[in-house]
Image: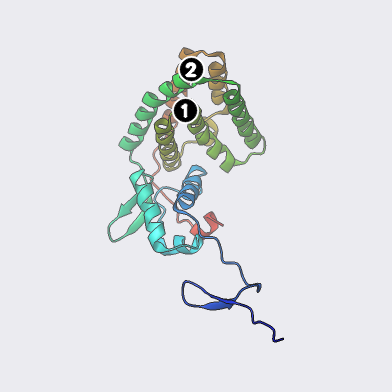
Amino acid sequence: MPTKAPARKTSANGATGATGTTGATPAREHSVDEIAEKISAAILEHRLAPGTKLGEDRLATIFATSRAKVREVLARLAHEQIVELVPQRGAFVAKPTIEQAQDVFEARRLIEPGVLRRLIRTLDDTKKQRLQRHIELEADARRREDKRAIVRLSGEFHVLLAELAGNSALARSMRELSVLTCLIISLYDAPTATSCRADEHEEIVAAVNRGDAQRAEKLMLHHLDHIEQSLKLDDSAEEVDLESVFS
C-alpha cells in the first residue's frame, strides 16, 4: 500500500510547507499594549531619556512587528503626553517644560490625597500585604543598589496606591503622571536618592495602615514637595541606542 504524503498547508503569504515537520518558530509578535508597556517601563527606569528619537523602523525591528502597529503605540503614548510627535521629524520621548512639570506636580497634589482617603476607607488585610510587599521590594532594591529597580519601584508605589484605592480612572491618571514625573526627574536631574526616599514611602504606608488619613495626606504632600524642590534645570539629552535599551 503506498505511503501517504504528509499534508501541506498554505500560509497567509502563499508559501506551503509540510505539517508534522519541525521548523523554525516565528518570533511572537508583541501587542500594542505590550509595546506601550515596555516603552513606559524604559522611561520609568530612566533607560530612555527625554528627547530620545523613537524611530518607527528601529522599533518595528526590535519588537518584530509592523510600522503600522508602532505608529499606533506612539499615537497612544502621545495622547498620554509621554511621546511628542513632530511633523516631518518623527516621534521623540517627551521633554516636559518647567511649566508642564509644575502642572504635573499640581495635579498630583490634588489627586493623591484623595487616593489615600479612598484607600483608607477600603483598606483590608490583602491590600496591607500588597503595600508591605512593595515596601520590601524597594528596600531590597536599595540594598542591592539596583538603580533601575529603585527608580521603577518608586514610581510604581504611587500607581499601586491608586490601584488599591479601587478607582480605575484614578489608577490610569496615576500611571500617566508617574511616567511624566520620571521624565521630569530625568530631564531636570533630580538625584534618585533624595527625590523619592524609601523612608517617606514607609511613613505613608504606616499612616495608611493606622487609618490616619490626615497624617497620610500630610506626608504625601510633603513627599511631592520634596521631589519637586529637588529638581534642577538640565536641558541636555544623550543619544540612546534603542536596541540596547530593549535587549
Residue 168 visible in the picture: yes
* Residue, far right: 1
Please provide percent x and percent y for residue 119.
49, 22
- Judging depth in this view, the residue of 247 and 7 nearest the camera is 7
Disc marking residue 234: none
Q: Which residue is mark 2?
A: 121
Of 144 and 234, nearer the camera is 144
The 10 Å Cα crowd at callout 2, few under 14, some 14 to 19, many 20 or more, is few
Q: Which comes sooner in the sequence, label 2 or label 1?
A: 2
What is the secondary structure assignment of the residue under circle 2?
Answer: helix
* Residue 146 pos. (x, y %): 62, 41
Number of other residues with Cα within 10 Å of mark 1, as a class: few under 14, some 14 to 19, many 20 or more = some
Q: Residue at x 57, y 20 (%)?
A: 124
Provide residue 74's location: percent of width, then percent of height: 38, 53
Classify residue 3 as left or right of residue 130.
Answer: right
Q: Residue furthest bottom?
A: 2
State left or right for residue 142 relative to residue 204. Answer: right
Question: What amino acid type is highlighted by mark number 2?
Answer: Arg
Say if mark 2 contacts mark 1, CB within 8 Å: no
Q: Amino acid at mark 1?
A: Gly
Q: What SS does tag 1 mark?
A: loop
In the displayed structure, 55 sits above or below 224; it is below
Q: Is residue 222 visible?
A: no
**Which residue is drawn at the image coordinates 35% and 48% (left, top)?**
78
Which residue corresponds to the image point at 42% horizontal and 64% vertical from the top-left? 57
Residue 133, given in percent of the width and then of the height, sits at 62, 30
Residue at numbered disc 1: 166
Looking at the rendered image, the quarter that the N terminus falls into is: bottom right
